[in-house]
Image (cartoon, rainbow, N blue to C red):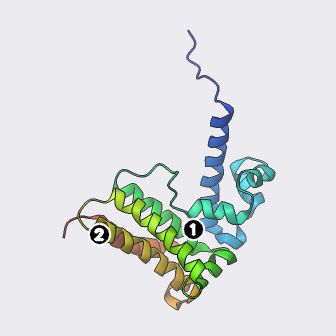
Amino acid sequence: MSTEEPPLSRAERRRSTEKRILNVARQLFGELGYDRATIRGIAKAAQVDPALVMQYFDSKENLFRQVVRLDAAQSAPETADPLIAQLMAGLGVKLAGMPAPSLAMLRSMLTHPDTAAEMRETFDRQIKQVSAVLEGDDAELRAALLIMAHLGVVVGKHLLELEPLRDTRPERIIELLDPCFKTLTDPAP
């Protein structure tokens, strides 16, 4: 009797490869920032051809978006700790550097009605996802505070270029925010 695992289907191999690329991209975007991370570098670290990265994600910007977004298609964490880890990982990647189109969208969300509507829809979706994991009567409010704190730090670092944020390593910012984010996940008054 054989103890070998059955071979993975083509779809399973694709999902595995895509996940490996996303994990490597998250690490490299976090370490190098958007501008210095390259498709070739990500592909090499993921042990795939750069053309395959482009086939899966179409562009470097789309790959970045997949890395940092809180996606409804991802398996939602069932408890607050993995949720906080997911939010902090995304924040770390954004703090390391963001693509110009993403920064332009953030800039224009306060002055352009269509962009504001698109961003509101994105934030509403994220708030719903986060509040579904939190407990307590004010879960939605705490989820909104988590998402908006995340946004505020990114805006402060990249758009306002506030000196303390601009000159501090992303890891240090994450370290300081972690207890704050954990407090917001606690349903106790």
Position in image of residue 172 (x %, y %): 47, 75
Residue at 24 percent of width and 62 percent of height:
136
Assign the N terminus to one quadrant of the image. top right
Residue at 51 percent of width and 85 percent of height:
156
Residue at 47 percent of width and 70 percent of height:
123
Q: Quadrant of residue 15?
A: top right
Residue nearest the viewer, comparing 74 with 173: 74
Q: Residues within 10 Å of mark 1 (few under 14, many from 20)?
A: many
**What amino acid type is highlighted by mark number 2?**
Thr
Q: Quick check: 102 left or right of 70?
A: right
Whether residue 150 is situated above or below residue 163 in the rendered picture: above
Position in image of residue 164 (x %, y %): 49, 88
As helix, strand or loop, the secondary structure at mark 2 comes to helix
Q: Residues within 10 Å of mark 2 (few under 14, many from 20)?
A: few
Residue nearest the viewer, comparing 157 with 15: 15
As helix, strand or loop, the secondary structure at mark 1 comes to helix
**What amino acid type is highlighted by mark number 1?**
Val
Q: Quick check: 141 left or right of 60?
A: left
Of pointers 2 and 1, the one earlier in the residue sequence: 1
Q: Can residue 167 be seen from the camera position used here?
A: no
Position in image of residue 106 (x %, y %): 58, 80
Residue at 38 percent of width and 72 percent of height:
144
Mark-to-mark CA distance, 2 and 1: 22 Å
Residue that carries the numbered disc 1 in the rendered image: 93
Position in image of residue 154 (x %, y %): 52, 78
Label ID, residue 183:
2
